C-alpha cells in the first residue's frame, strides 16, 4: 500500500503563521499523528501533498519514507491527489488521508484496508445527526454506493442523507490514476473533487465498499483553534480513559494531559492538572500530586511527587519523596528513599539512597553519596561563568545550612560542614570543616545617636 496525505490547506482560519498541519495536538504536530497511523500500516511509501508554508513542513518532517509533492494552487482534493500520482508506483493500492484529521487510528485504517481488499474502492463513512457541510454517500435501491455528492451540489433530498464521506479512502492505484485524469471542475465550487472518482469507479464496474471508524472522533477535522481545542480534548479523554481501564487512578480524567507516552505500574495515582511529556514511566504505587509537569522521567515503586513539582530528564528510585515545589532537571538520578523538598533544584547530579535535601537548595553537577543531609540554603557553585565543575560528596556527610561548595571540590565520607561554610578546598573525611569568622560580642557598645 502507498499513502497520500493531503496537507496543502492554508489553514487561514487558524489565524497563525504556523502552517495548519504543524499546529500541536497533544504536544506533536497534527501531521505527526497522521504519519504515525499511516506508518502503522507499513506502507511502501508516503507522499505528502504540501502547499502554503510547505517548506517549514518539509523541514520538520524530513524522513526517508516520505516523498513530497507540491500543489501550487488549491484546486480541490482531486487536484491535490493528482500531484502525488507521479510518485505512486501503481499495481497496488493507495490510501488517502487528510493532514488535518489527526485522530485517525491504525485499527480503523486496517479495517478499511481489509474492506478494500485487492481491487475495491473503500470509503470511510459515518452517520451523523447533523451531516451539513459534508459530502453525502448516495446508494442505489440495493444499498450499493453509486456516488458522493458534495453538500454545495446536493439536492434537498440528497442533503437529508446522514451517511457522510469522511474523506479517507483506499483506491486501486491504477484506477485512481485513470479516474483522476477524467474528473472535471464543473461544480458549485469550481474544484476538482476527489469524491467524483466514486461515480467513475462504479461506471468501470469496480465495487465500492464502506467501513466505519472505531470512534467518530477519529474523523474530526481541524480548521480553527476551536476545533483544535475540541480535538485535543477528545484525544485527552481517550488517553485518560485508557489509563483508567488499565487501573490508574485519575483524580479527574478531564484535568489530565498526556503529550507523549505514559507507562504506569499497578495502583498509580495522579491528582488533577498534571502534564506528562516525552516518555514517563511510573512504578507500582507511585503517586503524583496536583499541578506537576513530568517530562522524560522514570520513577521507582512507591515514590511520591508532591504538588507543583517540575521533573525533566530524571530517574528516581523507589520510595522517594519529591516536592512540593521541587525542580529536577536533566541528568539527575536519585537512589531509593531520596527526599527532595520544597524549592530545591537538582541538575545533572547523582544522589545515592536515603539522602535528603529538604529545603531551598541548588545541587548541580554533583555526585552525592548515601545518607547525606543537605541543609537549607546549600548551594553548589558549579559554574565560574565559563566552565562547569563537579562537586563530590561522600556517604554520611552532613552539610550545614547556607553552605556554598565552590566546585571542583570534594567532601570526604562522614564529614560535617558547619553552617555558612564557603568550601573552596576539599574537606577531609570524618572531620568538622567550617569557614566562618569567629563570632564576637562587644560589651558596652552603643548605637550611634542622631546629631542635633
Ligand atoms: C472534503 C470532501 C467531503 C468530505 C469532507 C470531510 C471532497 C471534494 N470533499 O470536503 O466529501 O465530507 O472532506 O471533511 O473531497 N486539500 C488540499 N488541496 C486542495 C484542497 C484540499 O490539500 O486543493 C486538503 C485540505 O488541506 C484538507 C483536505 O484536503 O486537509 C480536505 O479539504 P477540504 O477543502 O476541507 O474539503 P471539504 O470541502 O471539507
Ligand atoms: Ca473540510
Image: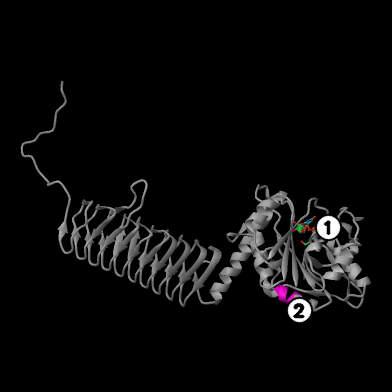
Answer with left or right where residue 9 lies relative to residue 396.
Answer: right
Q: CA distance from mark 2 to mark 1?
A: 27 Å
Q: Nearer the viewer, residue 159 or 66?
A: 66
In this picture, which residue range is highlighted in magenta? 108-112
Q: Is residue 225 visible?
A: no
- Foreground disc of the pair 2, 1: 1
Q: Is residue 149 visible?
A: yes
User: Label for residue 79?
Assistant: 1
| Ligand 1 lies under 8 Å from the Cβ of mark 2 | no
Which residue occupies the extreme top position in the image? 452
Indicate which disc, 2 or 1, sits on the residue closer to the N terminus.
Answer: 1
Disc 1 residue crowd, few under 14, some 14–19, many 20+, Cα 10 Å? many
Where is residue 400? Give x, y as percent: 22, 56
Of the 4 image quadrants, the one containing the N terminus is bottom right
At a point 71% along the width and 60% down the height, the residue shown is 99
At a point 13% along the width and 33% down the height, the residue shown is 447
Residue on which the image places disc 2:
114
Q: Quadrant of ligand 1?
A: bottom right
Where is residue 278? Give x, y as percent: 52, 64
Q: Is residue 224 above or below residue 107?
A: above
| Ligand 1 lies under 8 Å from the Cβ of mark 1 | yes
Secondary structure under tag 2 reads helix
Q: Nearer the viewer, residue 137 or 344?
A: 344
Q: Is residue 436 above or below residue 222?
A: above
Magenta includes 289? no
Where is residue 291? Give x, y as percent: 46, 60
Of the 4 image quadrants, the one containing the C terminus is top left
Prevailing SS of the magenta stretch: helix
Answer with left or right where residue 416 lies relative to residue 91.
Answer: left
Amino acid at each position: 500500500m502507498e499513502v497520500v496525505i493531503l496537507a496543502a490547506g492554508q489553514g487561514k482560519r487558524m489565524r497563525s503563521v504556523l502552517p495548519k498541519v504543524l499546529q500541536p495536538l497533544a504536544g506533536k504536530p497534527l501531521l505527526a499523528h497522521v504519519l504515525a497511523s499511516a506508518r502503522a500500516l507499513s506502507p511502501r511509501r508516503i507522499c505528502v501533498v504540501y502547499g502554503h508554508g510547505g517548506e517549514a513542513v518539509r523541514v520538520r518532517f524530513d524522513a526517508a519514507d516520505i516523498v513530497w509533492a507540491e500543489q501550487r494552487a488549491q484546486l480541490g482534493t482531486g487536484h491535490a491527489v493528482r500531484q502525488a500520482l507521479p510518485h505512486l508506483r501503481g499495481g497496488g493500492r493507495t490510501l488517502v488521508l487528510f493532514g488535518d484529521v489527526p485522530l485517525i487510528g491504525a485499527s480503523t485504517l486496517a479495517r478499511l484496508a481489509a474492506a478494500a481488499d485487492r481491487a475495491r474502492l473503500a470509503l470511510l463513512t459515518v452517520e451523523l445527526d447533523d451531516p451539513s457541510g459534508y459530502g453525502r454517500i448516495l446508494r442505489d435501491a440495493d444499498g450499493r454506493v453509486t456516488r458522493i455528492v458534495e453538500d454545495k451540489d446536493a439536492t434537498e433530498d440528497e442533503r437529508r442523507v446522514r451517511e457522510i464521506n469522511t474523506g479517507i479512502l483506499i483506491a486501486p492505484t491504477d484506477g485512481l490514476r485513470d479516474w483522476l485524469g477524467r474528473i472535471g471542475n464543473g461544480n458549485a465550487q469550481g474544484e476538482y473533487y476527489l469524491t467524483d472518482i466514486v461515480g467513475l469507479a462504479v461506471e468501470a464496474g469496480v465495487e465500492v465498499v464502506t467501513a466505519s471508524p472505531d470512534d467518530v472522533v477519529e474523523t474530526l477535522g481541524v480548521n480553527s483553534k476551536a476545533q483544535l481545542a475540541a480535538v485535543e480534548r477528545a484525544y485527552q479523554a481517550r488517553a485518560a480513559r485508557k489509563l483508567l481501564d488499565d487501573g490508574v487512578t485519575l483524580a479527574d480524567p478531564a484535568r489530565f494531559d498526556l503529550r507523549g507516552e505514559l507507562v504506569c505500574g499497578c495502583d498509580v495515582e495522579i491528582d488533577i492538572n498534571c502534564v506528562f511529556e516525552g516518555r514517563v514511566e511510573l512504578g507500582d504505587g507511585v503517586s503524583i500530586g496536583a499541578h506537576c509537569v513530568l517530562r522524560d522521567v522514570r520513577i521507582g515503586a512507591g515514590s511520591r511527587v508532591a504538588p507543583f513539582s517540575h521533573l525533566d530528564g530524571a530517574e528516581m528510585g523507589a520510595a522517594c519523596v519529591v516536592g512540593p515545589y521541587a525542580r529536577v532537571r536533566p541528568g539527575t538520578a536519585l537512589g531509593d528513599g531520596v527526599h527532595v523538598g520544597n524549592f530545591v533544584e537538582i541538575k545533572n547530579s547523582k544522589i545515592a539512597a536515603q539522602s535528603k535535601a529538604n529545603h531551598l537548595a541548588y545541587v548541580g553537577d554533583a555526585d552525592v553519596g548515601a545518607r547525606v543531609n543537605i541543609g537549607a540554603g546549600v548551594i553548589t557553585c558549579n559554574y565560574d561563568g565559563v566552565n562547569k565543575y563537579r562537586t563530590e560528596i561522600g556517604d554520611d556527610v552532613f552539610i550545614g545550612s547556607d553552605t556554598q561548595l565552590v566546585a571542583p571540590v570534594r567532601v570526604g565520607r562522614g564529614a560535617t560542614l558547619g553552617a555558612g561554610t564557603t568550601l573552596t578546598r576539599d574537606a577531609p573525611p570524618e572531620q568538622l570543616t567550617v569557614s566562618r569568622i569567629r563570632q564576637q560580642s562587644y560589651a558596652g557598645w552603643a548605637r550611634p545617636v542622631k546629631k542635633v
